[in-house]
Image (cartoon, coloured by chain):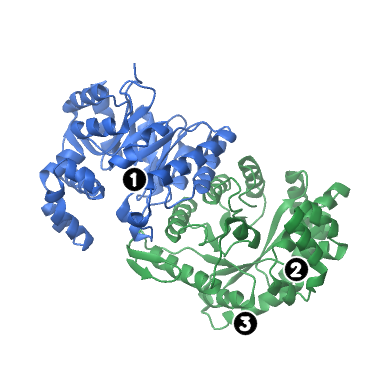
């Protein structure tokens, strides 16, 4: 038997720390097992946010990442995990990978010019794991992956976080990893989410933005595989030309929202979670805009109560 | 304190400082020594509410400038205005170990200050220069604020840069050097508006000495400082390079402990503040008289650490 399905909340590190902490405390109170604190060049520094969250919570496990190995050296990543672990104990996991190519290119990291990305990530993982092991730190190391090349190295990690929500895509991604569905590895999905009791138009729109962001960050191989390459060509061009969000959104096909996020009534969640279990997923992370407010986090809590 | 210290020690020292009359706490980055300086500064911020907390210093050679900007932004928010950010190139030994070099250090720090201030102001930046490559970069963490920026610098050109554009300067070195460095910085800062008065901070490696073992440790500290001191600082403090040549050579070849055997009494007094708590405070006082706004009681403090810090705090109160 594989591990039971556990749930996490993605933390949006471009809000105020106060707001992040409020939602994190709510997530802990609701019994969620994980908080995943992202680390993007345009957001607050993930390890500092993780520190603030850890100082105000006591049980919930904190996932740090995705930390890009192209933005941070393995030593920096080890330093961050070590400092957090030594202060707050065995409450941290780490997710590493390449990261969002478009955001990285904005700060001078040209992903396309780097050869052998999977090898680079593997080498970083080896160094990080070795340092953490020597220091007696038990943090699991997850791989954040989406494209087939990166999925192909997932076996070397304690777990993989897939940036997919559609069951068909998840099934394909798991097959690419070569991981066994009921094996020891953690298979997680991290997706834009809005599970609601009563829908709010503004948050539905945020879900659309979020799913478009994930789709735009997908590799050509993935878009081609699922017949989205041509459909997103115009949207990609507009994003590169820095068109307005409204203009871009008007061109985003509804299929993208369906494929790259879960936007559903709470009553539909049990069926979706059953599909994840069937696929072999044992960790599901509900990301932006589910964390939009304390209320939307509570809505998720109620939905999970109904589902489990 | 420096980020290479174990977290429990950082927290202990922060706790003592929090309960004392100290103005603030500075955390210097020991590059690649096992701990994250931004997280450690966060811990200090949480442990010492009400105290100013600064990073003094981190280097744009070591972290992407966007990482420094967002880590500082998080610390600013955590500290409700108590946070100060110090920038520097990095210690000579650390940079050599990491294989990092910089051709134009003055331009790098000047550009760093400019870029950080613009990121925090909420500007969308496109810069393709020798030092930074940012394309349509806009911080999403509610910019529109500023953070006091200090430069940890040594040479005359750097000192003049600090006097012109920084909110503060962090100096370290022999007292003869500090005196001259302060003059350069203050002269360059003449004409700045009163509200942007430059704050001068002096960081001194300090050690309460009670016995022979303490003195041996002080010599190791002196050897470490000497190995990392640029020639420009030696010139400004009129210290002949011959006097430190053996220390540097031995440090390079056999490490700081071996090099400490070449540290004379004069070198010890020049490069560290070591003695009893009363003596240490007298030196602090003389630094204040030279024009410093803030003196940092820097590590290794003495053994046991907490007792040493408390002794110096008491001695300062008496003074």
Which color was chain B given?
green
Residue B174: mark in rendering: 2
Q: Which chain does the residue under circle 2 lie in? A: B
Chain of the residue that carries numbered disc 1 in the rendered image: A
Left or right: A302 as drawn, with respect to B51: left
The percent position of residue A49, horizontal first and vertical second, equals 44, 45
- Left or right of B297, for residue A228: left
Q: Are marks 2 and 1 on the same chain?
A: no
Residue on which the image places disc 1: A12
**Residue drawn at x 30%, y 23% as measured from the top left:** A181
- Give the secondary structure at mark 1: loop
| Residue A77: x %, y % from top left | 49, 45
Tell me the blue chain: A
**Secondary-structure class at tag 3:** helix
Q: Nearer the viewer, residue B95 or A243?
A: B95
User: Could you tell me which residue is drawn at 85 percent across and 66 percent down?
Assistant: B266
| Residue A303 spot, x, y in % from top left | 23, 27
Q: CA distance from mark 3 to mark 1?
A: 46 Å
Task: Tell me how far mark 2 sits from mark 3, CA to CA.
Answer: 20 Å
């Amino acid at each position: 038997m594989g591990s039971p399905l556990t749930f996490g909340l993605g933390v949006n590190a471009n809000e105020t720390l106060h707001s992040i902490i409020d939602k994190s405390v709510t997530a802990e109170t609701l019994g969620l097992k994980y908080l995943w604190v992202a680390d993007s060049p345009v957001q607050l520094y993930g390890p500092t946010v993780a520190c603030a969250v850890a100082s105000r919570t006591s049980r919930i496990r904190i996932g740090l990442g995705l930390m890009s190995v192209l933005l941070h050296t393995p030593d920096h990543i080890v330093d961050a995990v070590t400092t957090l672990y030594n202060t707050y104990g065995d409450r941290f996991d780490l997710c590493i990978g390449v990261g969002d190519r478009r955001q990285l290119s904005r700060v001078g990291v040209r992903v396309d010019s780097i050869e052998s990305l999977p090898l680079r990530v593997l080498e970083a993982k080896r160094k990080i794991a070795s340092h953490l092991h020597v220091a007696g730190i038990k943090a699991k190391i997850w791989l954040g992956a989406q494209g087939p090349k990166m999925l192909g190295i997932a076996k070397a990690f304690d777990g993989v976080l897939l940036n997919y929500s559609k069951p068909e895509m998840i099934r394909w991604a798991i097959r690419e990893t070569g991981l066994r569905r009921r094996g020891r590895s953690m298979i997680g999905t991290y997706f834009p989410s809005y599970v609601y009791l009563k829908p709010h138009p503004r948050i539905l729109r945020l879900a659309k933005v979020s799913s478009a962001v994930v789709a735009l960050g997908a590799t050509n191989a993935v878009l081609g595989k699922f017949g989205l390459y041509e459909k997103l060509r115009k949207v990609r061009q507009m994003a590169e030309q820095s068109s307005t969000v409204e203009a871009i959104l008007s061109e985003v096909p509804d299929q993208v929202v369906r494929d790259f996020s879960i936007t559903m009534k709470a009553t539909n969640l049990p069926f979706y979670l059953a599909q994840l279990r069937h696929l072999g997923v044992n960790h599901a992370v509900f990301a932006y805009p589910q964390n939009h407010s304390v209320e939307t986090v509570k809505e998720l809590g109620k939905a999970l109560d109904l589902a489990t | 304190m420096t980020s290479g210290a174990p977290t429990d020690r950082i927290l202990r020292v922060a706790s003592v400082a929090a309960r004392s009359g100290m103005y603030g706490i500075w955390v210097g980055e020991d590059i690649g020594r096992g701990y994250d300086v931004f997280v450690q500064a966060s811990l200090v911020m949480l442990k010492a509410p009400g105290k100013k907390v600064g990073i003094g210093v981190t280097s744009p050679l070591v972290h992407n400038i966007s990482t420094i900007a967002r880590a500082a932004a998080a610390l600013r928010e955590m500290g409700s205005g108590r946070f100060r950010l110090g920038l520097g190139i990095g210690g000579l030994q650390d940079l050599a170990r990491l294989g990092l070099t910089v051709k134009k250090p003055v331009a790098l720090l000047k550009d760093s200050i400019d870029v950080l201030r613009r990121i925090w102001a909420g500007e969308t930046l496109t810069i393709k220069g020798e030092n930074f490559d940012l394309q349509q970069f806009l911080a999403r963490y509610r910019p529109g604020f500023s953070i006091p920026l200090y430069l940890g610098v040594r040479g005359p050109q750097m000192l003049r840069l600090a006097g012109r554009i920084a909110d503060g300067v962090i100096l370290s070195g022999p007292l003869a050097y500090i005196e001259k460095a302060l003059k350069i910085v203050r002269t360059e800062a003449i004409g700045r508006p009163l509200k942007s008065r430059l704050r001068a901070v002096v960081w001194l490696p300090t050690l309460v000495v009670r016995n022979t073992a303490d003195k041996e440790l002080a010599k190791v500290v002196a050897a470490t400082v000497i190995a990392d001191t640029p020639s420009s600082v030696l010139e400004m403090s009129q210290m002949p390079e011959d006097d430190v040549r053996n220390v540097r050579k031995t440090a390079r070849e056999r490490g700081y402990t071996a090099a400490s055997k070449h540290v004379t009494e004069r070198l010890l007094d020049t490069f560290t503040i070591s003695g009893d708590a009363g003596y240490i405070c007298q030196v602090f006082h003389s630094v204040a008289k030279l024009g410093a706004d803030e003196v940092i009681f820097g590590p290794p403090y003495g053994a046991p650490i907490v007792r040493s810090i408390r002794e110096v705090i008491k001695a300062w109160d008496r003074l």
